[in-house]
Every structure is written in C-alpha cells, then in structure tokens.
Image: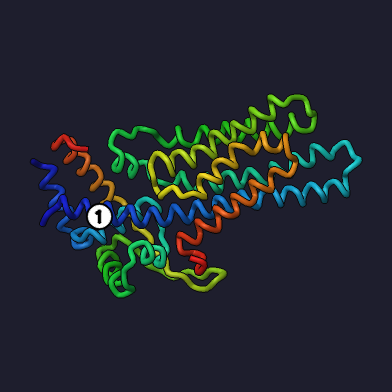
Amino acid sequence: MDIRKISKDADEVATKILSLTTRKDMGVFYLVWSVYFPIIGVVQLILHIFLGSSYIYPISVSLVELAIAVPLIFLTSKMFIRTKVEYLRYKYPGFKVGRIAIILPILVSTFFALIIGSTIAVPSKFSLIVYFSSYYALILVLGLRVFSKVLFKFKMTDTKFYDILAFVALLALPVGELILWWFYVIFLLTWSLASFMSLRDAGVIHGLS
Amino acid sequence: MDYLKELVDLLNNRGLSNPLRLGILISLFNKERLDYSDIRRALNISKSNLSMNLQILTEEELVKVRKIPTITGVKTVVEITEKGKEIIKQYFKIMEEVRKGTGSS
C-alpha cells in the first residue's frame, strides 16, 4: 500500500468536493446580499408612506435595517466559518488562527457598521466620516475576509471574473452611492450576475453553459 | 517510526484504504454534511461507483446516508458520524507528524 499516493489522491478528491461546495456557498452569499438592497428599498418606501412625517421614521428605518441585516450577516458568515480549523491546519501547515480570531472581527464589524453607522450616523446625518468608517468596517472585515480568505488566500475555489467584478462593486459601493444615488443598481447587477454564475458553475442552475 | 506504523494501521481500515473514500471523508469532516449530488458532480463519477463507496463507509459506521424532504423534492445527503470525525482528526494528527518527520510541508 502506497500511503503517500493514497494521501495525495485523497487530498485531490477533497479539494474537488470542497471547491464545488464553496462555489455553491459563494452563490448563496452573492444572492443573499444582492436581494438585501431591494428589500431595504421596499421597507423604506412602506415606512415612508406610513411614518414619513413622524420623528420616529429615521429610527424605524434603522431598526428594520438592523433586523434584516444582522441575521443575514450571521447566516452568511456562518457558511464560511464552518470550515474546520483542523482542516486548515492540515492543509496549510503553520496555520495557527483559532476560532475566536475568526468570529471576533465579524462581531466587531457588525457593531460598528450597523449600530453606530445605521442607528446614529444616518438619522442625525452628522458625519460622513462615521458613515464611511462604519461602512468600510463591515466591508473590510466581512466582505474582504470572505474574498481574501476563501478566494485569494486559501483558494477554496477558483477565482472567476465575476468574483472580481463583485469585489470591485463592493469596494466602490460607499463612494459610488455618494456620487450616484442609483449606484446600488450596479452593485445589484454585479452581485446578481456573480450569484447566477456561481450557482451555474456549481451545477445548481442548469443550462446556458 | 511509530507514526508511520499508526498511519498504515489507520489506512488499513476498509473505509480509508481507498483515496476516494478518504477524500470524501475529509470533505465531510469539513462540511459535516454534503449533498449526494454535489459529491457526484464534483468528482464526475457514476451513481453506482459513489453508492458502492458510500456503502463501505456506512458499513464502517463512518458516515450516514439519509433522504430529506426539500421544496424541490427529496434529496439524499451524506453526514459524517462521530466515529468518522475522530478518525479524520487522528489522520490529520498523524499526517502532521509524518510531515514533521520528513521535513516536508
């Protein structure tokens, strides 16, 4: 029995399976966040109709955004956190990051981006710096962790052109929204495309290949 | 060397003596549960080949195969058992020792 060959071939088998399932997870990740903005838009419209002139309108919008965003953040981050640390240590000798180091930044970024950014900065309109810092805290820690770790560092699946498009759209979103109010449409289109292509590449959506 | 003997002993397990089965088990350790169709699609193998290998893993009590209802119909999922997790943890540990021993990464 050639144990080295068994081990090497088994690694290849595991890599193929994990690459496909990670691509599927990426498809769901893109899908969830591309529908977030239209949902928020509809919610804002409804709240504006019923509470538009009320002083509780801005706080209501923030609370609803929080109520929708927090579960989505935990749902999508959980998808990528479930990769076992033991596996990463095996696959990448020298890898020393523990579970807390992965989870903590997500909790911190959620706090900055949503509690401070949404509840305080937006209703009071007091500072663009707060808006940017809170927004980029979320993007850097959540978005970039997914992109940098899943795609670029650990290469759990191949990086495709639509990943790069989605990545650029994510980085440009805060600035873009200040310049063009409808910039989120570009974000929406790139992330919808990335979602469709990811799910197609993972074999979830058939045809058009 | 002791760890090499341990590795040989471990890979003598019917469930792990084949790279396909060992690879499936490693990926299951990572994800806990996988869709049968995803495994087949990723490896591009026939239903009978995959079913036969999963049968062996099931007999060794390393995985469980079950059907679950979904919106689009019933789907088959494969789950790793506690015994399967322990074996893979042991495998990773021995492989780490092998790498240290040979000085390779």
Q: Residue at x 43, y 37 (%)?
A: A99
> Most extreme residue toward the right, as rendered?
A53
Dividing the picture into quadrants, the one containing residue B53 is bottom left
Please tell me whether residue B54 is drawn above or below residue A178 in the rendered image: below
The residue positioned 28% from the left and 37% from the top of the image is A93
Q: Nearer the viewer, residue A142 or B88?
A: A142
- Vertical relation: A83 (above or below) B54: above
Q: Secondary structure at mark 1?
A: helix
Q: Is residue A53 above or below residue B42?
A: above
| Residue A7, position as x, y percentages in the image | 21, 51
Q: Is the residue marked by circle 1 packed among few (<14), some (14-19), or many (20+) residues within 10 Å? A: many
Residue to which mark 1 is pinned = A10
Q: Amino acid at mark 1?
A: Ala
What is the x, y in percent for residue A81? 46, 44
Left or right for B90, reference A58: left
Left of A113 or right of it: where is B99?
left
Q: How is the image coloured?
A: rainbow
Residue at coordinates 52% horizontally, 67% vertically from top-left? A208
- Quadrant of the image containing the N terminus of chain B: top left
Q: Pick the residue in front: B81 or A39.
A: A39
Residue A183 placed where, x, y %?
70, 43
Where is residue B41 drawn, in percent x and y?
A: 38, 65
Chain that bears disc 1: A
Q: Left or right: A16 with respect to A207?
A: left
Q: Front-most of A166 and B94?
A: A166
What is the quadrant of residue B96 in the picture? Answer: top left
Identify which residue is drawn at 14% across, 47% down: B6
Q: Quadrant of the C terminus of chain B?
A: top left
